Image: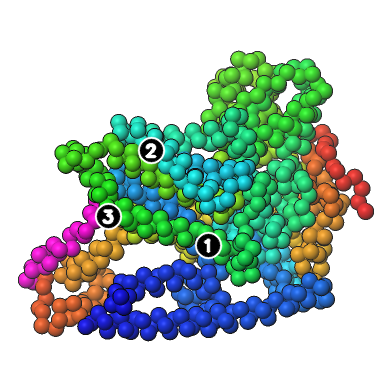
Amino acid sequence: MTRTLLRPRTLGLVLLGLLILGFPYFNTMFEFMSGWPVLGWLLDPFRVFQAMRFGVWLIVLMGLNLLTGYNGQISLGYAAFVAVGAYVAAILMTQYGVHVIPAVVAAGAFTGVVGFLVGAPALRLSGPYLAIATLALVIALPQVLKHDLVSDWTHASQGINFYEQGTPPVTPGVLEDRVATNQWLYYCAIVPAVIMTVLAWNITRSRMGRAFLAVRDTELGAEHMGVNVALYKMTAFGISSFYAGIGGALFVFTEAVLGPSTFDVMMSITMLVMIVLGGLASILGSIFAAAIMALRVDIVDKVVNLIPRGEEFRIDSLRGAIYGSLLVISVIAGPWGLAGGLRRLPRIRDRLVAGKFRFLGVSGMVYTAVRPFLLRRLRGAKSADPSRQGGTEARDEPHQEGGDTHRR
Amino acid sequence: MARIRIGRWAWLLVVALLATMLAFSACGEEKEGKEGTPQATKAAGETPSAEKVPGVTDTEIVIGSHLPLSGLAAAWGVDIKAGMDAYFKYVNDQGGVNGRKVKLIVYDSQYTGPVTAEVVRKLVEQDKVFAIMGGLGTAAHSAVVKYLETNGVPDMFILTGDSKWTEPVVKSRLGFLIPYPIEGKILGKYIADNFAGKKLGIIAQNDEFGKEGEQGLREGVKDANMQIVVESYEETQNDLIAQVQRLKNENVDVIAAYAMPIQVASVIKGAHETLSWDVPIVITGVDAVEIVGALAGLDNIEGTISVVFAHQAFEKDVPGIAQHWDIMAKYAPGVTPNNLTMVGATIAEAMTKVLEDTGPDLTREAFLDAAESLCGWMSSVSLVPVNMSPTDHRPIEVEVYVEATVDRSTDPPTFTWQPFGDPYGFESTKECP
């Protein structure tokens, strides 16, 4: 028993758990660190809100990654499912007085069923055709939500507002003195996020997850292996919509305000971009994606502020361009996403040592100076310069693909 | 063996970490307790001056704003921000407000609710602003309005005309643009006066903005015995030629449009150019900006009617406007003053006025009281006075009609919105105390 607890892996998980549980209190606990470079940034009280958003986005993006990353079905209409989940939960909570937990579960289940059914046309469509078909969903949804037939529930363009139509989320009475509202909301988002992440981890490593990958890589091959392609495609849609529903429900619970244009086409596209940046077909990738999503406003703002403001040069009008170029640069620099890049790190280091990358200018000089140390650390002092022997090719091989495959 | 050794060290680390956490959390609670006591005395109302007001130091006042600096509505946000920035820089160079410099932080709301919710929380929780001003976009601001209200952050001069900001009146919230139902009534009066007994075609965006405008227009023409046809569109739709065509088939005599600049331009161009249909068009004051002329084409827009609440950027002979050109030239070179930079500068001026009126003992309460008692005040560019009271949180309720005019004697032709007639409106604060 003690032996298993002593394993570094278990220990890492315990530490991670403590980190997640204690996070909202770190800023008061470690107040003296608030001036420190990196830690100070992390200890800002505002990070609690961002961490809460991170939890919500994690669930949402995890679902999209299951569909697009693992199952290879590109959906531009994913935000529509998030909106459905958000609306179902919001209506249940404000108009029928349902408690938040059953409301969130019901929203997830309902959206999951809707997604499963919407997945049926997906059987006939693939690639860009599927993308366009799903795009129609997200374009049509605001009009449907504003339609007179449902406006008693959705309040048309006014949207749902917990402050006016229900009760805004607050810490339940028992914990009131110990947990502030923003800390409480953080737990409300992060606990489901952890559960859903573990669930996704298990799904992707089960028979179902392997079937998803097989269908993505070659439908014909999967069919020959006895995979029911139709069923698994619809299931992927269903499961990803379940995630969307839960995420949307938590979004509206933590946000308390919801309108028909909250989840629009841009949101859909942004989500897709985020999982590509984070890393497709990877749990870690979804985590990175959610982190970028939660911090993107900060990131763009930082970059914008880095650029000096000239008299004639109006940087504010270029925000969109800066955001776009950041995306392009990151996709060119690492088409495999952040998670893929991390996995490839050992290989990149090997290539560095092998001198396969060419460096010019200052970086070349630095590299020439550092290279012997890199070599010594990696191979031991005895090893000669491997680039002359050409023996590194074979060394690269074991790193080629890890356990769960990753496609570019 | 190695594994166990790692484990032992790591466990020590965990224990140490736990110990520090416990120690610090104990400290934290103690501290909270200490902070709690002054709060209790504050509640008793002993020394209000000792109260720590967020965003206010002896030398600085921090004010925040959320504007769309990227995305669909970026054209508005960027210019309004330039106007605000320039005006506050000017104020700071004059010595600030009651000895304090104004620091304005503007974040990009991307014109969407979720991003606005994020940046406004950032302004309140991280930057600890004294007040929020000039939040733009109905959907965007809806996402934060209750958050600001419950946290007691003054929510000043909201740059959208939704009537829900000022109805019912909330102490910490003030509108700025004229509410759309009132503006609709003003436009409706013009239509009733000129087209009584005829057929009116309304083009309204399918959201609060369009609905409230339509409601105002209907009220304005109530007694004029007019037939009304309504066409709506979604905000994502840019080309409204189909709607215009349907109104033409209905043989309407005048069109009133509650639409955003791009769509309004599409209506004007579609009717006058594409369909060669010489129909009079009346548009919301939101679109009484220069860019609509460029979008619609100068030949097409000529004669279009709208409303404004202040002098415009082209009227350089008005002292306030001349001053605005000077300020912009000095503090925001590269930005040509226009009606949007004017809006930014005007709310910055109103903000400065309220801060000045509050006096050196700046608290949120006193600040809001000062804002409410703003009455009969003319900003440097005002056409009509700003009147407010504890029951009236709408600075502007009276507007002036303008007509799109093109002066062809210059090269290139200059396009302006020329005011005509008397100011008209529904001021609810009749007399200043």
- For the residue labelled by badge 2, is the local secondary structure a helix, a strand or a loop? helix
The residue carrying pointer 2 sits among few (fewer than 14), some (14 to 19) or many (20 or more) residues within 10 Å by Cα, namely many
- Residue annotated with mark 3: A205
Left or right of residue B313: residue A301: left
- Residue annotated with mark 2: A116
Query: Front-most of A178 and B264?
Result: A178
Q: Where is residue B211 in the image (x, y as percent from the top left)?
A: 67, 33
Which residue type does callout 3 highlight? Arg
| Cα distance between the residues tagged 1 and 3 | 28 Å
Q: How many labels does the image show?
A: 3
Query: Front-most of B22 and B184?
Result: B22
The answer to which image quadrant residue B44 occupies is bottom right
Up-down relation of residue A22 to residue B414 (above or below): below
Which residue type does callout 1 highlight? Tyr
Q: Residue at x 72, y 47 (%)?
A: B165
Both marks 2 and 3 on one chain: yes
Toward the left, the furthest residue is: A389
| Cα distance between the residues tagged 2 and 3 | 21 Å
Q: Is residue B136 shown to the viewer in this render? A: no
Query: Which comes sooner in the sequence, label 1 or label 3?
Result: 1
- The segment highlighted magenta reads A388-407
Q: Is residue A171 shown to the viewer in this render? A: yes
The residue carrying pointer 3 sits among few (fewer than 14), some (14 to 19) or many (20 or more) residues within 10 Å by Cα, namely few
Left or right of residue A210: residue A80: right
Q: Position of residue A130 (x, y in %)?
A: 34, 35
